[in-house]
Image (tube, rainbow, N blue to C red):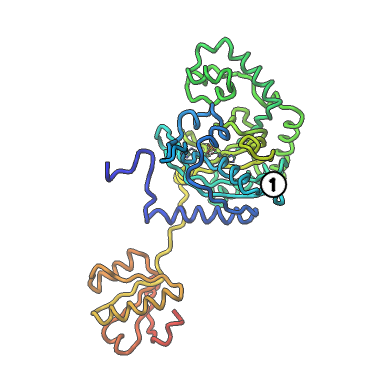
């Protein structure tokens, strides 16, 4: 137990973190191109935020939250997603009174008590974006474009964009009636959770994972056929902007998303390979969320991209992330005097911004070179007794094998 991380969590080890930094760096850079600014919200929030925001009939709230009472009896929850906290921060800090839209992004761990499987973890990480303050379908398309740019930049090909509209409370009421009428004589076959959803939120039944419920909802009325003029118009414009942007998509009326705050646009980027956890990115519009958690009526749209799933799909496509570079120098020394000379030199070079490693394991001369090779050093600096005496040293380029002599005065050249 002591030496085992909790189920569903994993360490990002020193040998792997370079890949994470690469993906995060790429994401940050793409967000910069769109004027999205980073937001960092706390790891835990008041439980009520997610109950209100994500919705009390969703799997996330019903079954998956890591909630606990703190010592003062406040009920808190480790964030299962990033949108509700971003909306809370938008309200709490009065950002709504600034010039809109507000464009933000985040990279955050999320926590959901899920049944563990490949691509489904209890602590996972999301790179997410949110645009608050505009109803324009341009924002929806721009959000999709950020995700598409990220996947494109990585060279991913076996992924498709599926879009849908889940309407607004007005048109959803009609769909809800039609759905209930369709499901009425199938009620007895539904799982217990869906029986509970039948009156509270029948649309959730479309998203149930139970095989029997999935069978029963086949042929159910789809939201797209019930859109009001406003939602239908929004969906048409959204599609037309995607076309302007050169982004290909498939309309999939089956996309209902697992969280309750969505209105109008819903979308997912899904692997085209047959795999269980193929959804790498999901998002959509949430025009009522801010008001629902107590803020002024403010529309919003965004996405969350799972970093672990992204890595999994990169692996499936055989795409490798560039390896982390080795250090600029490994200083190879012979004798105590050389160690002390090398230590001082390492300090000077690090102050100049170079990365410099030295042996700390008492390796002999030959093994220090092995070490330099293993850590992929670009160059080695070789220091022995003569070098200390002459105040100069050899610098060997590990790729070409070329070796030059450098005097202490010439250190600026390194
Ligand atoms: P979500 O669909 O629940 O949406 O999650 C977004 C992405 O997070 C998924 O597509 C998946 O890649 C990843 N993910 C979710 N659960 C897990 C898990 N248990 N293990 C590994 N990866 C997982 C949201 O969270 C919304 N907040 C997205 C959003 C932002 N909508 C609007 N703005």
Q: Position of residue 211 (x, y in %)?
A: 47, 21
Q: Is residue 282 left or right of residue 373?
A: right
How dense is the environment of label 1, judged by Cα within 10 Å: few (below 14), some, or many (20 and up)?
few
Q: Is residue 393 left or right of residue 300?
A: left
The single residue placed furthest to the bottom in the displayed view is 390
Circle 1 SS class: loop
Quarter holding the N terminus is top left
Residue drawn at 26 percent across, 85 percent down: 385
The single residue placed furthest to the top in the displayed view is 185
Whether 384 is drawn above or below 108: the answer is below
Q: Quadrant of residue 3?
A: top left
Residue drawn at 61 percent across, 50 percent down: 104
Residue drawn at 54 percent across, 51 percent down: 40
Q: Which residue is mark 1?
A: 245
Q: Quadrant of residue 334?
A: bottom left
Quarter holding the C terminus is bottom left
Q: Position of residue 343 (x, y in %)?
A: 33, 77
Q: Is residue 139 left or right of residue 85?
A: right
Residue drawn at 72 percent across, 32 percent down: 231
Q: Position of residue 120 (x, y in %)?
A: 44, 37
């Amino acid at each position: 137990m002591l030496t085992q991380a909790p189920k569903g969590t994993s360490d990002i080890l020193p040998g792997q973190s370079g890949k994470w930094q690469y993906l995060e760096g790429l994401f940050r850079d793409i967000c910069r191109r769109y004027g999205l600014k980073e937001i960092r919200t706390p790891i835990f929030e008041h439980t009520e935020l997610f109950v209100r925001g994500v919705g009390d009939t969703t799997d996330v709230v019903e079954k998956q939250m890591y909630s606990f009472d703190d010592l003062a009896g406040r009920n808190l929850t480790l964030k299962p997603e990033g949108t509700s906290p971003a909306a809370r921060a938008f309200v709490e800090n009065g950002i709504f009174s600034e010039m809109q839209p507000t464009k933000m992004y985040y990279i955050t761990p999320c926590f959901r008590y899920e049944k563990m499987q490949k691509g489904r973890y209890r602590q996972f990480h999301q790179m997410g974006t949110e645009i608050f303050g505009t109803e324009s379908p341009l924002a929806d398309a721009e959000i999709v474009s950020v995700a598409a740019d990220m996947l494109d930049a990585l060279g991913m090909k076996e992924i498709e964009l599926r879009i849908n509209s889940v309407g607004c409370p007005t048109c959803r009421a009609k769909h809800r009636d039609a759905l209930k009428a369709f499901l009425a004589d199938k009620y007895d076959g539904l799982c217990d959770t869906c029986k509970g959803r039948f009156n509270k939120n029948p649309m959730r039944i479309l998203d149930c994972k139970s095989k029997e419920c999935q069978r029963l909802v086949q042929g159910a009325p789809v939201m797209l056929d019930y859109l009001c003029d406003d939602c239908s118009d929004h969906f048409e414009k959204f599609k037309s902007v995607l076309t302007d942007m050169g982004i290909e998509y498939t309309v999939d009326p089956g996309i209902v998303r697992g969280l309750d705050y969505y209105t109008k646009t819903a979308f997912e980027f899904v692997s085209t390979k047959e795999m269980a956890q193929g959804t790498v990115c999901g998002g959509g519009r949430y025009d009522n969320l801010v008001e629902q958690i107590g803020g002024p009526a403010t529309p919003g749209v965004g996405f969350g991209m799972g970093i672990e799933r992204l890595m999994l799909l990169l692996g499936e496509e055989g795409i490798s992330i560039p390896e982390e570079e080795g250090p600029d120098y490994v200083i190879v020394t012979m004798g105590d005097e050389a160690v002390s000379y090398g230590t001082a030199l390492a300090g000077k070079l690090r102050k100049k911004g170079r990365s410099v490693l030295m042996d700390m394991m008492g390796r002999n001369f030959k093994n220090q070179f092995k070490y330099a090779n293993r850590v992929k050093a670009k160059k080695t600096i070789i220091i022995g007794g003569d070098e200390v005496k002459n105040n100069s040293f050899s610098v060997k380029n590990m790729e070409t094998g070329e070796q030059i002599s450098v005097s202490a005065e010439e250190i600026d050249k390194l």
